[in-house]
Image (cartoon, helix red, strand yellow):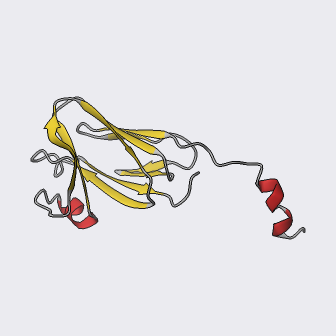
Amino acid sequence: VAPLHSFLPFLSFFPPVAPTTSVIRWDMPISIDPVGAGRSTAGKVLTVCLNDSVVFNWQMTHGIVQDKRRPWQRCNLASASKILIVDPPTATGSKTIVMNRPGARYYYCQVPGHCRGGQKVKVIVRNAPC
């Protein structure tokens, strides 16, 4: 068997796949449509690749908040660490977010009752392009 380093020049002919856009239908109940190899969903967790985009689309009155894990888990709308992405909530809308840093991101709707009703998603960004 040839040593691994002898295969490295051959592997360099396969460039990474271009970033894609996954879609979250941001109405209740939410639905998640991952797009492309290396992307997946499990429940309310979406895994994407570095530099992918995630688009939130909605038809009813909703907003988008990004927060840390614990306030997201508890649906703590009074969290001091929250970042308002879409505020005030709008009747219909679309928001695209480029996932340009690896790690977990937590999003929920700030309309009273929506987060506790299940309108939240965790996005895991892989630490490399796919």
Q: Is residue 77 left or right of residue 83?
A: left
Instruction: Please tell me which residue is depicted at 57% across the width and 53% down the height of the picture.
Output: 129
Q: Quadrant of residue 2?
A: bottom right
Residue drawn at the location 53% of the way across and 43% of the way down: 19
Where does residue 14 sit, x and y in percent of width and height? 73, 48
Across and down, in percent, residue 115 comes to 18, 50
Is residue 61 positioned above or below 68 on the image?
A: above
Residue depicted at 62% across the width and 45% down the height:
17
For the N terminus, give its image quadrant: bottom right
Judging depth in this view, the residue of 103 and 112 nearest the camera is: 103
Image-based side of 111 in relation to 50, left or right: left
Query: Residue 114's image quarter?
Result: top left
Residue furthest toward the right? 1
Front residue of this view, candidates 68 and 60: 68
At a point 28% along the width and 64% down the height, the residue shown is 69
Q: What x and y, as percent, mark residue 103? A: 42, 62
